């Protein structure tokens, strides 16, 4: 063999014992996706203005869409309950994108963060049980049907004046002395004091509210009668405009927005046009005006009026109006956001009472036996927006499919919920208090709905 042949390169491919085929089309696509994820947007699609606009639209559009979804349904949707998630999403998206400059990774981290935080904050029913075995059995039965999902601490009172033991109390994570905000149940208490003031000759239900609050004179709001205010037919909006503006940014932070003083309340009232006058439309603003009017007629502060005319006569020693400083530690929204106490000023007659299951059982017993002040407040006078319901002085009187006629009022603040229902014919009542701002009336009506 010629010597030159030995100098030729060996073109034979060595045989591998572990052949490794080249990546297929699917593998190449995955590698390309991974590569694109690792490349900053400014070095890829976001180099031009169109890409930058897309990034901004996504970062702003996702939280904005979440807010819009939270506003759908009912009067205000679930804005007060879950708008904090949109705020959290916005903060996470902006912070992550500023660090990573990678849109897809940013969106994934935002979605994961909101999901995990929502799961961690989601309320779970407390373990500790106390109180009457019969009431606890009723609660366990409701828990088995899922009616306690979304609760944490709950206190319940069942009143039956025909029973050997008229009042039975129990709780899960709370007891009959646990103080909680009762929210709009305050309106029902105010209605009793208003009816009592009528009996004392201090006010008239057909009188214009400006009779007792002269600062409203000359405005449409001042022409509304006390009767119209306590039956939600005055045409007042649910809240004043300034209060709604505060709610828009304070609710997502779990902060109290019902902080208007007397001057601000007067301004919100005098801005009312009463365009819906004569029709039923629930109004916390109107309730606050009615409560302040009766307090003015009695020459007392609203808090002192309620204490001397209702709480002390019924022995409700733990019940008070939460003004000036907090009386509770704060509850949570249905989605678990910690919420500060609702310490109020001029809006107090609409939602500022705090109470216990034990004290509310005293109120219920007095209402059932007719010894509470202002019993006329429970008499229905006006139609509502429900065909089976009428209203007295804030108290709702409804006819149920069970054949029962139930007189009731519920309530919610940012972090608490309440319900008090009376079956006056059967001399029975149910009270529910919760440290989560869920709809306690659902549980209360189930506990009260028994066949005759």
Image: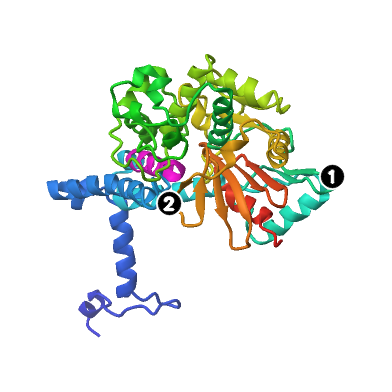
- Quadrant in the rendering for residue 143: bottom right
Foreground: 376 or 389?
A: 376
Q: Furthest-right residue in view?
A: 164
- Quarter assignment of residue 311: top right
Of residues 360 and 128, the one drawn nearer to the viewer in this rendering = 360
- Depth check, front residue: 275 or 10: 275
Secondary element under disc 2, as helix, strand or loop, is: loop
User: Residue 249: in sight, yes or no?
Assistant: yes
Q: Residue furthest left?
A: 49
Q: What residue do we see at 33% from left, 73% from top? A: 26
- The residue indicated by pointer 2 is 385
Q: Is residue 94 magenta?
A: yes
Residue shown at 73% from the left, 32% from the top: 177
Which labelled disc corresponds to residue 245?
none
- Which secondary structure lies at badge 1? loop
User: Which residue sits at x=51%, y=56%?
Assistant: 388
Residue 320 in magenta?
no
Question: Which stretch is magenta?
Answer: 80-95
Q: In terms of secondary structure, what is the magenta stretch mainly?
A: helix
Which quarter shows the N terminus? Answer: bottom left
Can residue 416 be seen from the camera position used here?
A: no
**Residue 100 at x, y = what percent?**
33, 43
In x, y percent, where is residue 29?
Answer: 30, 68
The image shows residue 35, relative to residue 440, as above or below, that is below
Q: Is residue 69 left or right of residue 44?
A: right
Could you tell me residue 411's position as x and y percent?
Answer: 55, 40
Q: Give the residue number, with chain letter if any, for mark 1.
A: 165
Circle 1 residues within 10 Å: few <14, some 14–19, many ≥20: few
Please report the residue visible at 50 percent of the width from the left and 49 percent of the height from the top: 390
Image spot of residue 79 (x, y percent): 40, 44
């Amino acid at each position: 063999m010629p010597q030159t042949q030995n100098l030729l390169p060996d073109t034979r491919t060595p045989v591998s014992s572990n052949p490794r085929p080249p990546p297929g089309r699917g593998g190449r696509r995955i590698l390309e996706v991974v590569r694109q994820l690792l490349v900053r947007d400014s070095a890829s699609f976001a180099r031009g203005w169109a890409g930058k606009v897309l990034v901004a639209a996504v970062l702003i559009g996702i939280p904005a869409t979440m807010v819009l979804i939270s506003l759908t349904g009912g009067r205000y949707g679930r804005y007060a309950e879950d708008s904090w998630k949109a705020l959290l999403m916005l903060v996470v998206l902006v912070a992550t994108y500023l660090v990573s400059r990678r849109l897809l990774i940013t969106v994934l981290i935002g979605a994961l963060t909101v999901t995990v935080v929502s799961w961690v904050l989601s309320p779970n029913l407390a373990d500790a049980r106390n109180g009457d075995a019969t009431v606890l059995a009723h609660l366990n039965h409701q828990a088995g049907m899922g009616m306690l999902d979304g609760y944490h601490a709950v206190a319940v009172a069942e009143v039956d004046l025909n029973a050997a033991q008229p009042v039975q109390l129990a709780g899960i994570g709370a007891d009959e002395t646990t103080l909680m905000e009762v929210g709009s149940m305050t309106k029902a208490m105010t209605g009793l004091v208003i009816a009592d003031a009528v009996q004392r000759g201090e006010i008239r239900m057909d009188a214009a509210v400006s009779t007792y609050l002269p600062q409203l004179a000359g405005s449409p709001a001042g022409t509304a009668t006390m009767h119209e205010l306590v039956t939600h037919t005055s045409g007042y909006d649910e809240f004043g405009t300034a209060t709604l503006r505060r709610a828009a940014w304070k609710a997502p932070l779990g902060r109290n927005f019902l902080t208007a003083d007397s001057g601000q309340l007067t301004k919100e009232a005098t801005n009312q046009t009463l365009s819906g006058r004569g029709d039923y439309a629930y109004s916390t603003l109107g309730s606050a005006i009615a409560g302040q009017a009766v307090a003015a007629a009695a020459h007392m502060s609203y808090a002192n009026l309620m204490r001397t005319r209702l709480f002390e006569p019924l022995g409700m020693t733990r019940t008070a109006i939460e003004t000036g400083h907090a009386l509770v530690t704060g509850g949570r929204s249905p989605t678990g956001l910690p919420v500060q106490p609702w310490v109020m000023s001029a809006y107090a007659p609409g939602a500022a009472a705090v109470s216990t299951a034990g004290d509310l059982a005293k109120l219920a017993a007095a209402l059932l036996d007719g010894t509470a002040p202002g019993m006329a407040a429970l008499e229905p006078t006006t139609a509502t927006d429900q065909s089976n319901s009428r209203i007295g002085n804030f108290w709702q009187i409804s006819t149920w499919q069970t054949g029962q006629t139930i007189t009731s009022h519920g309530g919610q603040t940012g972090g608490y919920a309440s319900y008090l229902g009376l079956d006056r014919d059967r001399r029975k009542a149910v009270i529910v208090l919760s440290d989560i701002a869920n709809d306690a009336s659902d549980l209360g009506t189930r506990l009260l709905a028994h066949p005759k």
